[in-house]
Image (cartoon, helix red, strand yellow):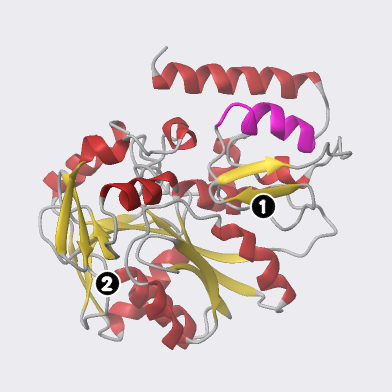
């Protein structure tokens, strides 16, 4: 069975089960549909709200049988459970023309920061957008992913623009960053900017779409990242075994190989080797460009040092316009031929 066939088979199975019951299932159904089928994206949306769900590195487990059988929060926010994505798109991107390849969008630019940022990836656009959002008081805090070391992701909340630099650069190992949403609420951060993978943006939208009437609204400005896949934490074990004694400070994927900067120089790995560590849950994802975000950001492949930026909502447009008007970002018209390549890349996921 091919990957697309697996996806549609899974969706049909979940849809049929959901039609059998007039309720939102709970943790045991999540275990059956997501955990047992290895489709979990490890977005983190269900973690720390529930005492039964825990993660061991990049593995999510249900430690005990869950007694919740109706209105389960974990099931309602999971991007891998059955979802009416059309209804969610209509809710958050109403009136925006829909593109079958890259989702609803208003316009696309190539963008770069006018000031270099330490450890920036490509054009440094995301870091600059986050600083703008904080300094202009569009948000009270930002949820980003830094690193404990060159490879291990570390999600954290930043309330000071100076902290954003800690999250510069890309993280290729999966991180359950959305678990920090509960911490943001406990801190009283009412308006939050969140940087996330496509699955995490989907979970954010489901949080609000399925929010119980007595629960406070989630005011989130979402910055979605382009993403083909995330790696399992077993990749770290592979590197430790392959390069004993080496420490790594940076990981990058310039074209068709992976470059690892170490204390003994750059080590290169073929993509085929690295792809063996792609998480199973990523193979079910068809969204490359974070189609439900307010603004999506990825690399601009033809020219190093630039980003591709997809404006989706008015809120995303306002954020980019502010950064450009303050001369923090340089934005240029996106070449039509590159937009076609972007669409093709998205279709190939």
Q: Secondary structure at mark 2?
A: loop
Q: Which mark is residue 207?
A: 1
Give neighbour class at mark 2: few <14, some 14-19, many 20+ (Cα, 10 Å): some
Left/right of residue 226 with respect to residue 148 in the rendered view:
left
Q: Which residue is mark 2?
A: 120
Point 35% across, 39% down: residue: 99
The mark lying in front, picked from 1 and 2, is 2
- Nearer the observer, 98 or 82: 82
* View extreme (top): residue: 1
Quadrant position of the N terminus in the picture: top left
- Nearer the observer, 342 or 7: 7
When the figure is inspected, residue 163 is found, relative to residue 23, above or below; the finding is below
Give the residues in magenta: 25-38
Point 41% across, 40% down: residue: 287
- The reply to whether the magenta stretch includes residue 58 is no
Q: Position of residue 282 (x, y in %)?
A: 44, 37
Q: CA distance from mark 1 to mark 2?
A: 30 Å
- Nearer the observer, 252 or 30: 252
Q: Position of residue 148 (x, y in %)?
A: 45, 69
Point 48% across, 83% down: residue: 134
Quadrant position of the C terminus in the picture: top left
Q: Earlier in the sequence, mark 1 or mark 2?
A: 2
């Amino acid at each position: 069975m091919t990957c697309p066939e697996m996806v549609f088979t899974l969706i049909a199975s979940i849809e049929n089960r959901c039609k059998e019951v007039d309720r939102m299932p709970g943790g045991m159904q999540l275990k059956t549909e997501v955990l047992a089928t290895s489709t979990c994206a490890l977005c983190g949306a269900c973690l720390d709200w529930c005492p039964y769900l825990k993660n061991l590195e990049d593995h999510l487990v249900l430690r005990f049988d869950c007694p919740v059988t109706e209105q389960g929060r974990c099931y309602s926010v999971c991007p891998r459970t059955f979802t009416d994505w059309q209804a969610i798109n209509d809710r958050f991107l109403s009136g925006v023309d829909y593109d079958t390849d890259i989702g609803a969008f208003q316009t696309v630019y190539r963008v770069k920061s006018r000031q270099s940022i330490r450890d920036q990836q490509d054009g440094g656009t995301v870091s600059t957008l986050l600083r703008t959002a904080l300094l202009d008081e569009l948000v009270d805090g930002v949820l980003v992913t830094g690193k404990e070391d060159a490879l291990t992701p570390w999600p954290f909340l930043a309330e000071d623009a100076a902290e954003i630099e800690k999250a510069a650069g890309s993280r290729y190992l999966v991180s359950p960053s959305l678990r920090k949403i509960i911490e943001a609420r406990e801190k009283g951060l009412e308006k939050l900017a969140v940087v996330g993978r496509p699955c995490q943006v989907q979970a954010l939208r489901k949080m609000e779409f399925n929010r119980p009437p007595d629960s406070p609204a989630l005011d989130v400005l979402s910055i979605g990242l382009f993403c083909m896949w995330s790696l399992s934490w077993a990749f770290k074990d592979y590197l430790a075994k392959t390069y004993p004694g080496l420490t790594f400070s940076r990981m990058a994927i310039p074209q068709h190989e992976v470059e690892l900067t170490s204390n003994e120089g750059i080590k290169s790995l073929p993509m085929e080797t690295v792809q063996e560590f792609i998480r199973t849950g990523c193979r079910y994802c068809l969204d490359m460009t974070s189609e439900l975000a307010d603004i999506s950001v990825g690399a601009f492949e033809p020219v190093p040092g630039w980003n591709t930026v997809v404006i989706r909502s008015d809120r995303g447009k306002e954020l980019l316009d502010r950064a450009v008007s303050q001369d923090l970002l340089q934005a240029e018209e996106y070449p039509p031929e590159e937009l076609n390549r972007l669409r093709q890349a998205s279709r190939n996921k």
